[in-house]
Image (cartoon, coloured by chain):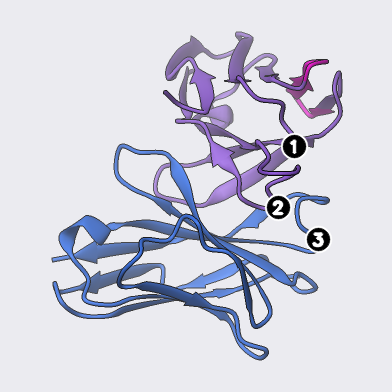
Chain colours: A blue, B purple
């Protein structure tokens, strides 16, 4: 039973390019969460999604960031026109029912903007 | 100030020693989750606590949540080099009307070094 799968593990983008981060939740999990870990900062919540629905996006920057979790396929975190400050580790977590059985995290995608 | 305070920030111990990491909130916690992170890697789930006074153990690691559900401790007995890493507490500190449904707040982490 594969865990939460994130790809790519490492992503390098030039300033102004788009970054697409993918997350496939654990089998049977229908809730997906994205977190960002900036250098020297803690892990910060970004967005909570269920299939085809954004439940809570209170942690998402207002511009350039978007997330989706389509009916089929992985959840996607999209960052448009990346800037150096977007360089961070982005983690995805999933759960079967929100919070009742804990949250399983993926290995993360480390985004470097050059 | 942090909503979730974790202490100490770093800890260096000799192999075989016991140690405790604390996680404190000024708000009642709906759930408290302990994770371990190796540098540059993902988070490994350790334990989940939800009830006041709850205590759970796995191998040499014990986690407790106080009766008021505002403080948790993680205790490692007879530490080993394999215990080294970053320990993170994450909590559901609730929102309007109750649980925050998956929006975990994390502490800053405790960096544990175990010398052989």
Residue at 86%, 23% in the rendered image:
B54
Question: Counting other residues with Cα less than 10 Å from the Cα at mark 1, is it few (<14), some (14-19), or many (20 or more)?
Answer: many
- Are the residues under marks 1 and 2 on the same chain? yes
Compute the Cα span from label 1 to label 2.
10 Å
Left or right for A18, reference A52: left
Q: Quadrant of the N terminus of chain A?
A: bottom right
Residue at 46%, 26% in the rendered image:
B2
What residue did someone put label 2 on? Answer: B101
> Where's residue B89, x and y in %?
59, 32
Query: Relative to B33, does residue B20 appear above or below in the rendering?
Result: above
Q: For mark 1, give the secondary structure.
A: strand
Disc ID at residue A97 = 3
Whether tag 1 and tag 2 are in contact, CB under 8 A, the answer is: no
Q: Is residue B99 magenta?
A: no
Query: Relative to B19, does residue A38 appear above or below in the rendering?
Result: below
Q: Which residues are magenta?
A: B57-68
Please tell me whether mark 3 or mark 2 is closer to you in this view: 2
Q: For mark 3, give the secondary structure.
A: loop
- In this view, the residue in front, A65 or B82, is A65
> Where's residue B37, x and y in %?
51, 41
What residue did someone put label 1 on? Answer: B31
Q: Is residue B66 magenta?
A: yes
> Where's residue A78, x and y in %?
39, 76
> Where's residue B44, x and y in %?
62, 46
């Amino acid at each position: 039973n594969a865990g939460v799968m994130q790809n790519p593990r490492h992503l390098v983008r030039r300033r102004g390019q788009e970054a697409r981060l993918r997350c496939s939740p654990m089998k049977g999990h229908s809730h997906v969460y994205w977190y960002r870990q900036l250098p020297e900062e803690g892990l910060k919540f970004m967005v909570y999604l269920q299939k085809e629905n954004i439940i809570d996006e209170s942690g998402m920057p207002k511009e350039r960031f978007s997330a989706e979790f389509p009916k089929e396929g992985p959840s996607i975190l999209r960052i448009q026109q990346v800037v150096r400050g977007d360089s961070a580790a982005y983690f995805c977590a999933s759960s079967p029912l929100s919070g009742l059985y804990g949250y399983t995290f993926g290995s993360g995608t480390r985004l470097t903007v050059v | 100030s942090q909503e979730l305070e974790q202490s100490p920030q770093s800890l260096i111990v000799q192999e075989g020693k016991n140690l405790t990491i604390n996680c404190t909130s000024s708000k009642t916690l709906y759930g408290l989750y302990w994770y371990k992170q190796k540098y540059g890697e993902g988070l490994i789930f350790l334990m989940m606590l939800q009830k006041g006074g709850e205590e759970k153990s796995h191998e040499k690691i014990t986690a407790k949540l106080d009766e008021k559900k505002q403080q948790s401790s993680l205790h490692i007995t007879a530490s080993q080099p394999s215990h080294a890493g970053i320990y993170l507490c994450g909590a559901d500190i609730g929102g309007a009307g109750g649980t925050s449904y998956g929006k975990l707040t994390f502490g800053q982490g405790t960096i544990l070094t175990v010398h052989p």
